[in-house]
């Protein structure tokens, strides 16, 4: 698992506390994005746009890419931590729409 942060930092095998801390910085507008990836084409990510957070997940390539919008930082943490633990519930935590990329 690899954690990538908007200021060009990246960490291998991050712990839950580390992921939470980076998401808090994103929610505060101190980071542009957070990506947590198993492989290059399998990941979850979040970006901040104004008061909203754009949440996305992708699995097995761009043909399976989903997006939602939230302002709930707690639910965002739940989403990332479910992915980190390998819990597939992250796919149903938001009202995701499939994107055609």
Image (cartoon, grey):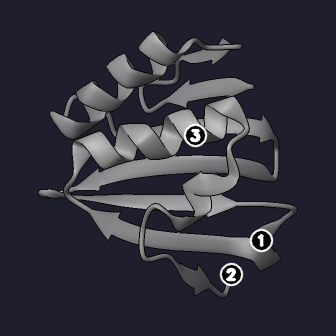
Real-space Cα distance between discs 2 and 3?
A: 25 Å
Residue 101: mark? 2
What residue lies at 44% left-to-right and 59% top-to-bottom? 55
Compare residues 31 and 69 and report the one nearer the observer: 69
**Where is residue 54 shown, x and y percent of the image?**
37, 61
Q: Which residue is mark 3?
A: 82
Q: Secondary structure at mark 1?
A: helix
Q: Which residue is mark 1?
A: 62
Q: Label 3: few (<14), some or many (≥20) within 10 Å?
A: some
Q: Secondary structure at mark 2?
A: loop
| Residue 94 falls left or right of residue 100 | left
Q: Label 2: few (<14), some or many (≥20) within 10 Å?
A: few
| Residue 89 falls left or right of residue 26 | right
Depth check, mark 1 against mark 3: the one in front is 3
Q: Earlier in the sequence, mark 1 or mark 2?
A: 1
Vertical placement of 10 versus 85: above or below? above
Real-space Cα distance between discs 1 and 2?
A: 6 Å
């Amino acid at each position: 698992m690899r954690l990538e942060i908007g200021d060009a930092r990246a960490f291998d095998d991050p712990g839950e506390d580390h992921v939470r801390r980076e998401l808090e910085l994103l929610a505060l507008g101190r980071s542009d994005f957070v990506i947590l990836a198993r492989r290059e084409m399998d990941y979850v990510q979040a970006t901040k746009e104004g008061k909203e957070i754009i949440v996305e997940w992708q699995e097995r390539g761009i043909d399976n890419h989903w997006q939602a919008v939230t302002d709930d930082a707690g639910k965002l943490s739940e989403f990332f931590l479910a992915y980190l633990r390998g819990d597939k519930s992250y796919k149903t935590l938001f009202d995701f729409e499939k994107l055609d990329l």
